[in-house]
Amino acid sequence: MNFTENPEYVNWPEMHYVFVEKIGPFMQNAGAAWQQAHPLVPALLENNKITGYMALYKMGPKIYRAGFSLAAAPVKLPEGLQYEKFHGGKYARFELTGPYDNLPQASGHAWAIASEKKIEVRDDFAIESYVNDPRTTAPEQLVTHIMIPVV
């Protein structure tokens, strides 16, 4: 697994975010949320510009959101998607290069490093930002930013 061990600290900007939300175990719900979100992309693109694909999640209550950042507030949001203006903030960013199958292990490792380094985490959504397109990128070259919200 090609994974950065030392986080970079970044400020994530405010964004318009539309998503499918699932509550419960991530291993069960993450794939299901994406399977529900992906078919809505064509309808979403009829009136909106997608600027990124990302998941937002909270560990405590186990909330997982599969979704898309938009260039502006959504117009004619397709049924099945929710909207929220995400306020962003400061994050410790780790980078995984490789297949999405490695995400559970990489995410767990990022949280373990944050704990070991005594990084002060704030109560907010963590982010998995998918940097390149899996339709046109080989699995071993996929880049995902795993971002943990920090104080």
Image (tube, rainbow, N blue to C red):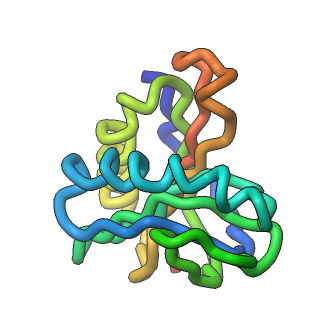
Q: Could you tell whether 29 is left or right of 11 in the image? A: left
Give 55 or 46, whichever is nearer the viewer. 46
**Residue 149 seen in the current view:** no
78 over 36 or under it: above or below? below
Give 64 or 143, whichever is nearer the viewer. 64
Seen at 33% across and 45% down, the residue is: 31
Q: Position of residue 4 (x, y in %)?
A: 53, 36
Seen at 79% across and 66% down, the residue is: 47
122 over 108 or under it: above or below? below
What is the quadrant of the N terminus in the image? top left
Q: Quadrant of residue 50?
A: bottom right
Give 7 or 118, whichever is nearer the viewer. 7
Q: Could you tell whether 36 is left or right of 136 in the image? A: left
Seen at 51% across and 67% down, the residue is: 19
* Number of numbered discs visible in the structure rendering: 0
Q: Position of residue 11 (x, y in %)?
A: 70, 69
Q: Position of residue 118 (x, y in %)?
A: 37, 65
**Residue 135 seen in the current view:** yes
Q: Quadrant of residue 60?
A: bottom left
Give 36 or 124, whichever is nearer the viewer. 36
